[in-house]
């Protein structure tokens, strides 16, 4: 049953992407355009081939987070406005399971949106990033934490309804405070501590260590970066589930699931 629900949500999400091709192409173009603009200004108009791989990896994770955060909040608000959310909770199937399926589908569709322009950028700008299976594992752990963070935002949305501005603020903060544009090692100590508590910072660090410094999983575990990534993602996942359940319970008590 669980796999069937998740499969249906994935199929629906991919069909929507394919149906609205113009929107998909616009998002793909946006991914590439922003990266080229950011790299141009950060490098004073120069094309530093040594700096681009690090910037591309950080940008990849951030843009992934950006789409997931913005889309999940928009989807939930749209459901509340149309009354679909209340119908989900009236379904014999667990509402949590349905929403979980939606988030998994969103993560996979986001992978499509992000992967295409990243591959094109790497080819056009001749950015060389060694591909290793360890990078996939680091990405999955990072996405797990992002999944929990998204659940927390969804829980808040069930109570306060309008969180578009909050989601926009968060994704902008993640751009500047997670080491996307520059390694957090360049930050002041106090800002580094704040940055490393955010959901994608440690994922960017570990991904760069594995891809660019050719470190193994064992080495990243021994230096503590992978350990902290696992702890960070686990905490965000647990906290996200708790906040979502809390928001869900309050919305049910108030009878506001179908109200916007």
Image (cartoon, helix red, strand yellow):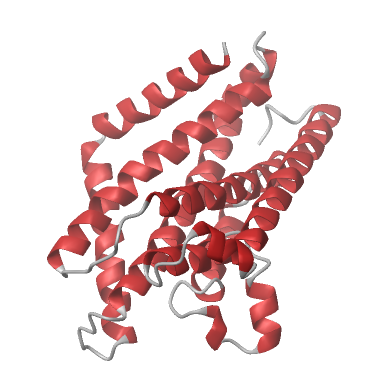
Q: Is residue 86 visible?
A: no
At 52% across and 62% down in the image, what residue appears?
171
Relative to 226, is 89 on the left or the right?
Answer: right
Q: In the rendered image of this protein, does residue 137 appear above or below residue 75?
A: below
Q: Is residue 150 left or right of residue 12?
A: right
Residue at x 60% of width, y 66% of height: 225
Query: Which quarter of the rendering shows the C terminus?
Result: top right
Instruction: Give the quadrant of the N terminus.
Output: top right
x and y, in percent, of residue 8 in the image: 44, 18
Residue 215 falls in image quadrant: bottom left
- The residue closer to the viewer here, 58 or 66, is 58
Residue 222 locus on image (x, y percent) = 62, 66
Residue situated in front as seen by the camera: 23 or 208: 208
Instruction: Determine whether, in the image, residue 194 is placed left or right of residue 76.
Output: right
Res. 38 in view: yes
Q: Is residue 63 left or right of residue 121?
A: right
Residue at image x 28%, y 59%?
30
Q: Please, is residue 61 above or below residue 52 in the view?
A: above
Q: Is residue 252 above or below residue 28?
A: above
């Amino acid at each position: 049953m669980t796999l069937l629900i998740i499969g249906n949500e994935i199929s629906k999400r991919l069909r929507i992407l394919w149906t609205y091709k113009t929107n998909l192409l616009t998002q793909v173009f946006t991914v590439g355009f922003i990266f080229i603009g950011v790299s141009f200004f950060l490098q004073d108009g120069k094309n530093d081939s040594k700096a681009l791989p690090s910037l591309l990896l950080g940008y990849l994770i951030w843009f992934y987070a950006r789409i997931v955060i913005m889309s999940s909040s928009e989807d939930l608000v749209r459901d509340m406005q149309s009354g679909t959310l209340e119908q989900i909770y009236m379904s014999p199937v667990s509402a949590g399971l349905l929403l979980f399926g939606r988030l998994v589908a969103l993560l996979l569709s986001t992978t499509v949106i992000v992967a295409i322009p990243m591959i094109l950028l790497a080819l056009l700008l001749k950015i060389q990033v060694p591909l290793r299976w360890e990078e996939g594992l680091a990405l999955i752990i990072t996405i797990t934490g992002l999944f929990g963070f998204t659940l927390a935002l969804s829980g808040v949305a069930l109570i306060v309804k309008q969180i578009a501005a909050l989601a926009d603020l968060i994704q902008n903060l993640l751009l500047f405070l997670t080491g996307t544009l520059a390694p957090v090692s360049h930050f002041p100590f106090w800002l580094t501590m704040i940055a490393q508590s955010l959901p994608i910072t440690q994922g960017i660090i570990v991904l760069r260590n594995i891809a660019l410094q050719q470190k193994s999983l064992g080495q990243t575990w021994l230096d503590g970066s992978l350990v902290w990534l696992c702890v960070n993602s686990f905490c965000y996942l647990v906290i996200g589930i708790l906040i979502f359940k809390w928001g869900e319970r309050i919305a049910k008590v108030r009878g506001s699931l179908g109200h916007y």
